Image (cartoon, rainbow, N blue to C red):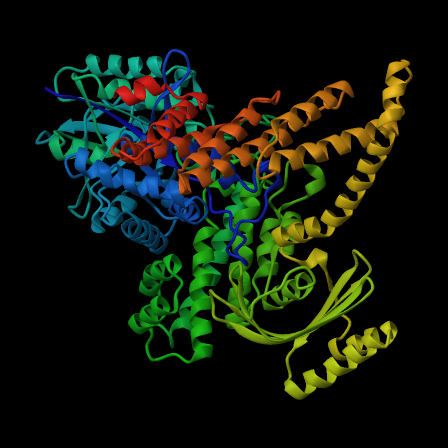
């Protein structure tokens, strides 16, 4: 009898993209990271792929990819983000599944997930089908195989969803023990109730469905899973492994599977260094011949269910009241504000349900002359979402359009399909999960609703926003000054809107700072420059041009004319209007440029008023991230001037400060400030020099200590870390003695500072070189290679690797 252990991680973040840009904008609550995806990736998804196993002295003896060892699923929208923003880690996730096929009897570690984490029992059948189809298609495109299992969002289950999954080739899913109602051995008639999660979680079960189809279900161990997620079990990898071993030896009448399922973010994000405890536990399990580390698909291939199970309909793993957490004030919340209520959940869902029906009506009515089967087309639209190229779009329309579509009909078709995509995204479960309707997760699903409303209006002329806001007004925030859902929608959602005109404004104003190519992409907009001229006089500039702006998603396009003015150092404004033809533009351009050349600024403003009308745009109308970037550009020269002035003050008065110090006289605050700014500026320049001067840096540090200059440790750590990582990347690209010496120079500099620098990325680069470059060097007989080899191994020791242990194995 073989014993099995399976560890499952459910990796998920809600989709966070601005639906008008198809990109995530900066989220201040995730600071110092750009957004929460970036933060959780740095704390969890990436470390799991390169987890450290340490010796007793805290030195690295192995770096392992935990995804090769554990069962896992990734939310499709999250994995799409990782593919674009962290391609190296994305590659490790995909590779891990490929390698697990070989080590797990042809069964991969990865499972699919219903697409955007919609609570399936609360969805209509059409939406359930699309969620499963999109989840399967996304998985197949990424992993190159059909998924055997599928994770249900929040493990929320009902029979209809299981029927749909089975019909699409899904063999199994994972549920919590409390979701089982009764069990019986196959072939028996009498059921045995398993209340309160009392089901035996060490065996698989068969769920027979009304249609005659079947679904295999494995119920995870609730106690161990809870202690991993909410207890202290990840404080020690040894304790984690021991707990799993103990559970394994307790079952004896069959081939038991001890399996746990938790949020993947438990390992590193919720519990710092949790990924290292996981790596250590997995290493211990694999080293024990009495158990087999497995994944669910492999286990089921070798252990068919001998028992049948009935599920408790409309239940989940994170709500004690079934699925009420996503539609009522059931009492389940994250607990941060126990005095708050969640009465806002019900009117939020009612408002979205009403909107969904309105959108479905528009979709069916206006797609009838365009698409053969609108709902089948929606199911297949995932192919376009995954690859928005002309070829994929053309193939999609060839398959689904009732006739060849002209450009206007194509825009209508894609608007309708995008309306439906946003109608799906607006049901992402996190919108109800947390404590208040004002949270970023709920605001995000309201953004998707707003985009769907806008697209419906563009196609049909029907505007559902007032009705939607009327329903939202019943959803009261716990924060009195924030009002209700309608107030939050107006305050936090409407400013996110963007269109072709706003994209033109962005290009116009930012053209004062950067040169755009003739064709460029700005988020999900394509911009073609048809004409452009710019004149400058002192600190005033004018730019005028013609642009062809198009949506890369809906194919909507428009030709626009702009005139932009820089009036002084910080005052930028822009006007935009439709392009009415070349002659009109030429006359307008000549009037504006000739007036500007004469210095007749009032005359220029009158021409702009006459030709463009009264509406004006400023920096505040730029897209959020680009707005911040341009403000940084604007500030850079100003800050540089200020710092140089302070540097001059410091240099001019250094001798005086020495005298004041010698005589015990108080040093004026302005001189202290100048000293701090000057020394920090010099230190930054010294660290960033192509060849670091350790003597100079040592002198600057002594001066800082002398004048009691406090170092910003976060700033300093980031400065040193980036410099070291930059040098390590150069070394990995050109692994010669010169670059090895440079890395050691920078590392010596890092160790001079009174701050602990995160060596994680530098260690990862070194480890990859240890596995790829170093073996090649060992086979090389060139003269001087021994010096390089010794220097490389010495670098590993300095990066806290146990080189003796690693090279011995």
Q: Nearer the viewer, residue 84 or 406?
A: 84
Residue 196 vs 26, above or below: the answer is above
Quadrant of the rendered structure where residue 34 is?
top right
Q: Nearer the viewer, residue 204 or 692?
A: 692
Q: Is residue 557 left or right of residue 579?
A: left
Q: Position of residue 765 (x, y in %)?
A: 41, 34
Q: Position of residue 629 (x, y in %)?
A: 64, 51
Name the image quarter holding the N terminus.
Answer: top left
- Residue at the extreme front of the image, as rendered: 783
**Which x, y percent locates residue 673?**
82, 30
Query: Going by the picture, which residue comes out furthest to the left?
Result: 187
638 displayed left or right of 184: right
Nearest to the observer: residue 512 or residue 449: 512
Quadrant of the image for the C terminus?
Answer: top left
At 50% from the left edge and 37% from the top edge, which residue is drawn? 727
Q: In the image, what residue occupies the spot 53% across and 65% down?
A: 520
Q: Residue at x 39, y 28 (%)?
A: 792
Is residue 262 in sight in this rendering?
no
Image coordinates for residue 242, horizontal then vertical, percent: 29, 13
Q: How many labels, in total?
A: 0
């Amino acid at each position: 009898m073989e014993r099995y252990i399976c560890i499952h991680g459910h990796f998920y973040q809600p989709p966070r993209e601005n639906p008008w840009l198809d990109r995530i904008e900066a989220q201040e609550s995730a600071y110092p990271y750009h957004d929460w995806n970036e933060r959780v990736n740095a704390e969890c998804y990436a470390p799991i792929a390169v987890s450290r196993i340490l010796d007793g002295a805290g030195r690295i003896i192995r770096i392992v990819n935990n995804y090769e060892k554990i069962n896992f699923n990734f939310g499709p929208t999250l994995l799409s983000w990782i593919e674009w923003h962290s391609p190296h880690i994305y590659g490790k996730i995909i590779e891990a599944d490929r390698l697990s096929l070989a080590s797990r009897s042809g069964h991969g570690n990865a499972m699919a997930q219903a697409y955007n984490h919609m609570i399936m029992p609360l969805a209509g059948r059409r939406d359930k089908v699309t969620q499963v189809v999109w989840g399967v298609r996304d998985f197949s495109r990424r992993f190159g195989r059909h998924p055997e299992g599928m994770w249900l969002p929040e493990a929320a289950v009902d029979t209809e969803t299981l029927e749909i999954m089975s019909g699409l080739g899904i063999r199994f899913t994972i549920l919590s023990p409390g979701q089982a109602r009764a069990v019986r051995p196959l072939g028996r008639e009498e059921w045995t109730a398993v209340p309160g999660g009392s089901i035996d979680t060490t065996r698989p079960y068969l769920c027979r469905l009304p249609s005659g189809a079947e679904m295999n279900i494995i119920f995870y161990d609730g106690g161990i899973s809870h202690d991993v997620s909410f207890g202290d079990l990840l404080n020690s990898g040894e304790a984690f492994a021991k707990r799993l071993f103990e559970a394994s030896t307790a079952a004896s009448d069959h081939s038991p599977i001890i399996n746990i399922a938790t949020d993947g973010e438990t390992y590193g994000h919720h519990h710092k260094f949790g990924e290292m405890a996981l790596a250590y536990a997995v290493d211990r399990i694999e080293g024990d011949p009495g158990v087999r580390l497995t994944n669910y698909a492999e286990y089921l291939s070798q252990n068919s269910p001998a028992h049948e199970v009935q599920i408790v309909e409309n239940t989940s793993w994170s709500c004690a009241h079934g699925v009420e957490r996503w539609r009522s004030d059931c009492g389940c919340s994250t607990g941060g504000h126990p005095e708050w209520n969640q009465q806002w959940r019900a009117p939020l869902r009612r408002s979205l349900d009403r909107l969904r029906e309105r959108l479905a009506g528009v979709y069916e009515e206006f797609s009838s002359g365009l698409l053969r089967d609108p709902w089948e087309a929606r199911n297949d639209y995932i192919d376009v979402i995954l690859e928005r190229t002309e070829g994929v779009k053309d193939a999609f329309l060839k398959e689904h359009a009732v006739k060849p579509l002209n450009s206007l009909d194509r825009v209508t078709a894609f608007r309708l399909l995008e309306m439906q995509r946003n109608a799906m995204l607006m049901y992402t479960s996190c919108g109800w999960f947390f404590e208040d309707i004002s949270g970023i997760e709920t605001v995000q699903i309201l953004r998707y609703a707003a985009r769907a409303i806008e697209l419906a209006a563009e196609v049909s002329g029907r505007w559902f926003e007032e009705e939607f806001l009327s329903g939202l007004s019943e959803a009261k925030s716990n924060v009195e000054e924030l009002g209700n859902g309608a107030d939050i929608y107006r305050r936090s959602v409407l400013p996110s809107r963007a269109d072709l005109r706003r994209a033109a404004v962005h290009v116009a104003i930012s053209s004062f700072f950067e040169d755009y190519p003739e064709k460029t992409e700005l988020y999900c907009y394509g911009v073609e420059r048809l004409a452009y001229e710019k004149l400058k006089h002192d600190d005033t500039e004018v730019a005028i041009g013609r642009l062809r702006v198009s949506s890369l998603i809906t194919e909507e396009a428009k030709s626009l004319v702009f005139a932009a003015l820089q009036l002084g150092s910080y005052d930028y404004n822009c006007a935009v209007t439709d392009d009415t033809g070349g002659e009109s533009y030429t006359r307008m351009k000549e009037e504006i440029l000739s007036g500007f050349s004469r210095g007749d600024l009032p005359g220029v403003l009158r021409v702009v008023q006459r030709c463009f009308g009264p509406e004006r745009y400023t920096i505040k109308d730029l897209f959020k991230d680009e707005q911040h970037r341009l403000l940084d550009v604007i500030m850079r020269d100003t800050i540089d001037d200020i710092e140089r002035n302070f540097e001059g003050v410091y240099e001019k008065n250094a001798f005086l400060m020495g005298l004041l110090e010698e005589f015990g006289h108080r040093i004026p605050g302005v001189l202290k400030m100048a000293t701090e700014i000057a020394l920090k500026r010099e230190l930054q320049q010294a660290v960033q020099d192509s060849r670091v001067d350790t003597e100079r840096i040592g002198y600057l540090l002594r001066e800082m200590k002398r004048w009691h200059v406090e170092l910003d440790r976060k700033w300093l750590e980031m400065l040193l870390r980036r410099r070291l990582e930059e040098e390590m990347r150069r070394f990995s690209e050109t692994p010669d003695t010169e670059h090895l010496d440079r890395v050691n120079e920078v590392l010596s500099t890092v160790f001079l500072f009174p701050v602990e620098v995160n060596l994680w990325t530098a260690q990862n680069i070194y480890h990859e070189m240890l596995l790829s470059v170093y073996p090649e060097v060992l086979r090389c007989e060139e003269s001087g290679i021994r010096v390089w080899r010794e220097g490389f191994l010495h670098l590993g020791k300095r990066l806290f690797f146990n080189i003796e242990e690693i090279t011995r194995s």
